[in-house]
Amino acid sequence: MRRQEVQHGLGRAAQADALRRHHQRPVQPAPIERAISTAGGVRLDALDGRSMLRAHPGLFLAGEMLDWEAPTGGYLLQGAFAGGRAAAAGMLDWLRETGG
């Protein structure tokens, strides 16, 4: 068994299947004053330089999953796109390192 399978108790396929089966349904939309952007999420110091969550190796985060704020007007989208690209590059590096 690979290191990450032992550590998490689930292989990659089982983790992906669990994520696909998980659904969250919103109760109601937030008023526009709150819906523009939100604060909160995973603290940036919980990630390594590759956008990987230190507590869960192999789990990469970006965008609104993170605790960061930006003014409205496209900055949040740009940040999410750039963060997603950085997390994907970090994931590829990690997969090369771990033989995944």
Image (cartoon, helix red, strand yellow):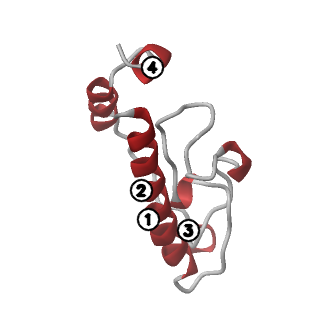
**Amino acid type indicated by mark 4:** Arg
**Amino acid type indicated by mark 3:** Ala
Determine whether the residue tagged by mark 4 lies in a helix, strand or loop.
Answer: helix
Q: Earlier in the sequence, mark 2 or mark 4?
A: 4
**Amino acid type indicated by mark 1:** Arg
In the shown orientation, is residue 22 left or right of residue 72? left
Q: How far is the residue under mark 1 from the one under mark 3?
A: 25 Å
Residue that extends furthest to the bottom in the rendered view of this protein? 73
Count residues near mark 1 (Cα–Cα under 10 Å), then give few for <14, some for 14-19, many for 20+. few
Q: How far is the residue under mark 3 from the one under mark 2?
A: 27 Å
Residue 71, percent from left and from top: 66, 80
Determine whether the residue tagged by mark 1 lies in a helix, strand or loop.
Answer: helix
Q: How far is the residue under mark 4 from the one under mark 1?
A: 26 Å
Q: How many marks?
A: 4
Residue 31, percent from left and from top: 56, 68
Asked if labels 1 and 4 touch by Cβ distance under 8 angstroms, the answer is no
Asked if labels 1 and 2 touch by Cβ distance under 8 angstroms, the answer is yes
Q: How far is the residue under mark 4 from the one under mark 3?
A: 40 Å
Image point 62% across, 31% down: which residue? 55
**Amino acid type indicated by mark 2:** Ala
**Residue 5 can be seen, yes or no:** yes
Count residues near mark 4 (Cα–Cα under 10 Å), then give few for <14, some for 14-19, many for 20+. few
Q: Earlier in the sequence, mark 4 or mark 3?
A: 4
Q: How far is the residue under mark 2 from the one under mark 1?
A: 5 Å
Q: How far is the residue under mark 2 from the one under mark 4?
A: 21 Å
Q: Can you tell which mark lies on residue 3?
A: 4
Q: Label 3: which residue? A: 35
Q: Label 1: which residue? A: 85
Q: Label 2: which residue? A: 88
Determine whether the residue tagged by mark 2 lies in a helix, strand or loop.
Answer: helix
